[in-house]
Amino acid sequence: MEKNIPVLYQEKSDCCGCGACLNICPRNAIRMAADECGFLYPKIDVDLCVGCRKCTSVCAFQNINENNTPLNTYAAVSQNKEQAVKSASGGIFASLAEDYINKGGIVFGAAFDEKRGVSHRSINKTEMLYLLQGSKYVQSKIGNTYKETKELLNSGRKVLFSGTPCQIAGLKSYLGKEYDGLLTVDIICHGVPSEKIFQSYLRFIEDKYEGKLTDFTFRDKNIGWGINGKAVFENQAGKKKKVTLWQSGSSYLFYFIKGWIYRENCYRCKYAGAHRPGDITLGDYWGIEKQHPEFLSDGWDESKGISVVIANTEKGKVALEGLQEVEFRQSTFKKAAVANGQLRHPSEQGKRSEILELYRSGGWNALEQMYQKKIGLKKYSSQIKAIIPQNIKRWLKANI
């Protein structure tokens, strides 16, 4: 009898790489394979496949439309100063995760691995929370974490699962039913570059600074709230050097913010709007100086980071109400979406085709050369902004 092998996607834009099909396959016949730019797509082993088609039925990106609508939207900051500094924005994820762990729960999120790749993993101790904190501007590999989540939930454990909206939608579709013990958190996502592209950039800066990379973060709160990273290198003599990766001075951050190095489906993301798959949506409250200047004049310091927090379900609303170390102030989805474009629409492709073709032919060195030609003196704008006093910076943002 001839097997009817499923077709998982017709076009690359039909697949978000969430891994739900890989997790659901009863024969382990699916693996995630990288294309020439490193973006992961599911591939079926025809010798193992039995044609059950569970993989196609579980694809949330192709089959399921979200119908959640925002219940409440807040601006929020954690009162735990130590956690807030380690976090990309206001420290709300850390507060949620700590609360879940203290109640005996397990938390899943994206973490750097030993090779500076990014993978989803679980933690069950607050001392491990730092692994999941901070932004990772690269797609996280889900692996078997959907399976692990289901096993934990079926055993009666509470689970908090965080990720991009498509990863949350993939988890929910894989589970196939609601679990009282599951809380899902999606992030406001611009789009995701591949691990291969990110690793190419890391090799480039290791060569540039003549040392082995020993520490890396996309956003260093020690120089304020923004998208300025940090890298630490160690040379052959054992001497370490810390380098600030300014948003305007880093070619990777430049291409990421432009939106030119994301996977193809990101430009038609069905979750970039008000209908979100997570119980809670978290992100930076960009533009708060214009939307809520009264919050800043009433004691909040935006240099420490301020989060936008959206309760999409009653479960999410209850979870937020239970947080003791967070100060919430009421906002609206409309206000939060003004400077968070991905709450209104997907990112635009712009020069993606040109940039990825250049990457395929010349690697990151070719992208660096193009960046240097384009950026000129603008590369110093982040450094200049960093030395402007906060009160002047606040006035400029609110009035320009």
Image (tube, grey):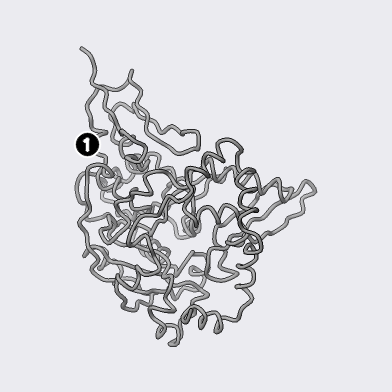
Residue found at the far bottom of this picture: 298
Name the one closer to the observer, 189 or 369.
Answer: 369
View extreme (top): residue: 1
Residue, far right: 237
For residue 187, side relative to residue 53 (left or right):
right
**Location of residue 54 in the rendering, given as x and y in whole percent from the top left corner:** 23, 32
Identify the residue shown where x is 40% and y is 56%. Answer: 189
Measuring from the top left, give residue 8's x and y in whole percent: 30, 32
Figure check: 256 above or below 50 = below
Q: Is residue 316 left or right of residue 41?
A: left
Does 384 sit left or right of 51 as displayed?
Answer: right
Residue ID for mark 1: 57
Q: Residues within 10 Å of mark 1 (few under 14, many from 20)?
A: some
Q: Secondary structure at mark 1?
A: helix
Identity, as a three-letter code, of the amino acid under mark 1 = Ser
User: Residue 196: horizontal and vertical position, in percent?
Assistant: 53, 40
Of residues 50 and 81, the one nearer the viewer is 50
Q: Position of residue 90 (x, y in %)?
A: 44, 70
Position of 256 with respect to 153 (left or right) is right
Q: Residue at horizontal 23%, vertical 14%? A: 2
Number of residue marks: 1
Residue sitting nearer the eye, 219 or 290? 290
Q: Quadrant of the N terminus?
A: top left
Residue 386: quadrant of the picture: bottom right
Q: Nearer the viewer, residue 185 or 71?
A: 71
The residue located at (27%, 40%) in the rendering is: 59
In the rendered image of this protein, does residue 33 appear above or below residue 95? above
